[in-house]
Image: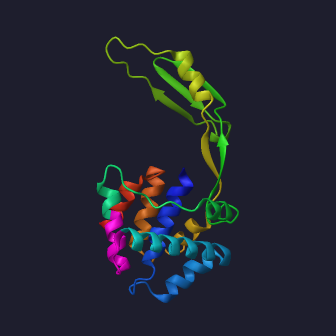
Amino acid sequence: MKYIITLIIAALFYSCLGNDKIEKEQIDKFESALGKIETKYLNLLVSDFDSYLSKKYKIENSYLSFKQYLTEVSESSNPDFWKIDKIKLEEIQKTNLLAKYDSIYPDSVWYNNNVINVSYASSNGIINSIALIRKENQEFNIDSLINSIKTKPRLEEIEPSYFKIALESLMQEDALISNYLDAKQAAGSISKRLTASGLLY
C-alpha cells in the first residue's frame, strides 16, 4: 500500500528534523506548507515511531536507534517494520497528509504479436505493453492473462499529499529531499529497503 510507505518515509524524514543542522526557518517553512492539522498528525506519528524505536533498541540516543532501524530494514530479509495504529491511520486518511488515490481499471486489454497491450481512459492514449517471454515448452493462456489484467486496478493519484508539497517547498535547500523526490519521480514507488539504504548513505 502506497500510503503506508509514504507514512514511513514521513516519520523517518520528520524524525531527522530535530537535527541541529536543520535551521528553524526550514522547519517553519515545512510546517507552514504542511498545514496545522497535518503537522499535528505527523507529530503524533513521529512520537509513535520514536516510542517504537526506544522500546525495540533500548538505546537512549534517538539518532543511533534510528540508524539501527535503517540498517535492519536495509539488510534484513525479514525486517520488523514499524506499523501505524489502525485508528490513527483512519483519522490521518481524513486529512490531507496523504495522497488520495482512486482505483482505475483498464479501458481496453488486447493481445498482439506476443505482447499484451493495456490502455486506461485517463492515460491520454498512452498504451502500456507487456511482452510475453516464453521459456522453452511454456504455453500461456492468453484469455486468462487478459481477464486477470482487466480485473486488476491500478492506483491513480487524484490529490497530492500535503507532505509531498511540504517536501517540495524545501527541495532547493536540502539535497536529501531533492534526491529523494527525484528518485521517487523517476522510479514511482521506492521499496522500503532502498529508501533505508539511501537514508543511511
Relative to 109, is 55 above or below? below
Relative to 4, is 27 above or below? below
Q: Is residue 171 visible?
A: no
Query: Residue at left 57%, top 74%?
Result: 44
Q: In this image, 86 relative to 47: left or right? A: right
Query: Residue at left 43%, top 84%?
Result: 22
Given residues 54 and 33, the one toward you in this image is: 54
Relative to 14, is 143 above or below? above
Q: Main secondary structure of the magenta part?
A: helix
Q: Which residues are magenta?
A: 57-70
Q: Quadrant of residue 194?
A: bottom left
Q: In this image, 149 relative to 77: left or right? A: right
Query: Residue at left 34%, top 81%?
Result: 61
Q: Residue 160 appears at what percent x and percent y?
A: 62, 60
Q: Is residue 66 magenta?
A: yes
Q: Quadrant of residue 88?
A: bottom right
Query: Residue at left 35%, top 65%?
Result: 69
Q: Is residue 163 visible?
A: yes
